[in-house]
Structure formats: C-alpha cells, structure tokens
Amino acid sequence: MPIEPVAKVSDKVIRKIVFPAAGMGTRFLPATKATPKEMLTVVDRPLIQYGVEEALASGMDDIIMVTGRGKRAIEDHFDISAELEANLHAAGKDELYREVSRVARMASVAYVRQKVAMGLGHAVLCAAPWVGDECFGVSLADELMISDVPVMQQLREKHEESGFSVVALARVPEEDVSKYGIVDVDQEQGGLFRLHGMVEKPEAKNAPSNMAMIGRYIFTPRLFDFLKEGEIGVGGELQLTDAMNTLAKVEPVYGLLVNAERFDAGNPLGFLIANATLGLKNKKYGDLLKAALEKLL
Ligand code: G1P
C-alpha cells in the first residue's frame, strides 16, 4: 500500500482520548470480580481518576470511556451525586464537598459499551464512531504515570511536531518482556524512535528489543482501518498491537521513551508498590505511613 501523507495535524488540537475500561481484570482476581480494576484505589482516588486527570492536564478533555458489564461504578464516579454533595455541604465537610464536586464536574465523558470481551483492539474500535476522522489519544488506566509534564502531554508535543502516531515506551527487564507489547526500533532521532513494528507479549528470546509500550498512545485515525480489517491474534483477542504493526508499515509510527515514574498497578504487586510509593509522598499520610512501615521492617 503506498504511503499517503496524513494531514499535518499540528493546527488541529487533539482533544479526544479513549479509555478502554472493559477488561475483566483477570490479573487482579478476586478483587476485580465485582469491582472494576479501574476503580481500585491508590492512596485516596481510583486509578481511572489519575488517568483522567493526566488527560485533562494534557488538554485532552473530550473523553470516551469504553466500558462493559460490571463497570457502572466508573460512570457513577464521574457523575454528580446531588444527595452526597448536599449531605457533605450540610455537614460542613467543605474539603470533601469541594473534592467530590470537582471530580463530578472535571470532565465530559461519553460512555460506549463493548458488548463482547474481544480484547484491547476491539475496545478501541468501539470508540471509532465517537472519534471520527481525527487524531486521538488512548490511555490504559491500570498503568499509572506520575510526572511533572504529564505523559500524554509529552506524546502530544511529539505528535504535533511529526503529525503521526506516537507511543509511550519504557525499557523493561528481560523477565518482564513477555508481559507487554514490544517494539522493533530504528535509531533514535530527536528523542523519537521510528518503529518498524511491534509484537504482543513475545518470549524474551524472540523479542525485537527490551522496549515496551506502556499504555499511552496517540494515533492517526488510520489505525481504525486496520482494526476493522484485523484478525484475531494472541489470546483469541483483536490486538491493538497487531493493528499498530500494520499501521507502522504504511505510515510512520514513532516511540518516545517518556519521563515518568510508572506503576503497572493492574496486578497486586505493582498496585502495592504504587500505594507505598505514592502513600509515602502524600502530604497528609506520608509521615504517618513511614512511621507505621518502620515499625514493621
Ligand atoms: C496491554 C497491551 C500491551 C501493553 C500493555 C501495557 O496489555 O496489549 O501491548 O504493553 O497493555 O500495560 P495488557 O496489560 O492489557 O495485557
């Protein structure tokens, strides 16, 4: 297929971002049997709120959440609870009242239902009618990123320079390679790697590099063409990685090693590390947690 240049998008600000949140959270059962993994709490707020706040801080305020059965709590979290707000206000709990009202009004969120569990690629494809013919972000909320410049903003800046898809990368230890989508990279240029391809969860000995995709992406809408045509891949699912691999063959797809403290909080160990790290840094709880941990160690 010939390479057709996509319209330079730097004059068109990206505002749309898709949060695939329909996954079953199997890595975290039984906690995620009746609670969406996106609602697991790190310190004082659910994972999905960190993701949404990162998107908003990156100027992406048109949010499309792809949910499924058992995910109602996510909708309720970003909805106005008039009764709760009235009660907090009447009880003079001003700080809590302000926080609860802020979260309920922070974003305009559209909810799309993924009716069948067919994988991440299929979840992103479910958002296609709402995204239309625009470049857009994708964020996986179980990957928690803490950084001065929000990770989606780091991607957006590179996307605006290049006009093409940009994916967040991190180097991972060999034993973790088989947990991620791994990229095949060219020489770094201006902080960006041109990606020749990517493979979902390879065995370490077959992996093209040790650089993993870590759940933050900006895509050109052409990705949808390859998701629509896509075949079922690893694990019987429509893989986002496979569609990206095809996209990378017809137009540039770049990777950026992002600056962030990253937690893979969708599994119990990563989640515990996230809670300990952010708990220790927390203004309100940090010193108390430190004292409690010192007693244990
Ligand atoms: C998904 C993606 C994978 C990516 C990972 C990041 O995998 O399929 O390419 O590296 O997220 O966390 P999952 O963790 O949903 O199995």
Image (spheres, rainbow, N blue to C red):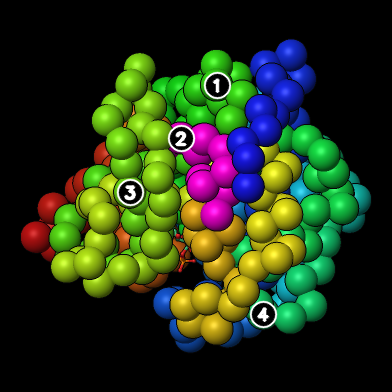
1 vs 4, front mark: 1
Taking the image as drawn, is residue 123 in sight? no
Separation (CA) of disc 3 from disc 2: 11 Å
Q: Position of residue 44 (x, y in %)?
A: 51, 50
**Residue 123 included in the magenta stretch of the image:** no
Q: Which mark is residue 184?
A: 3
Tag 2 near tag 4, CB within 8 Å: no
| Residue 83 or residue 128, whichever sits in front | 128
Q: Which residue is mark 4?
A: 117
Instruction: Name the foreground residue: 228 vs 125.
Output: 228
The kind of residue tagged 4 is: Ala
On the image, the x and y values in percent for residue 116 come to: 74, 81
Mark sitting on residue 162: 1
- In the drawing, does residue 15 fall left or right of residue 1? right
Q: For the point 41% across and 65% down, which residue is it? A: 200
* Measured Cα–Cα span from mark 1 to mark 2: 9 Å
Asked whether the beta carbons under mark 1 and mark 2 sit within 8 Å of each other, the answer is: yes
Would you name the residue on which mark 2 appears? Answer: 254
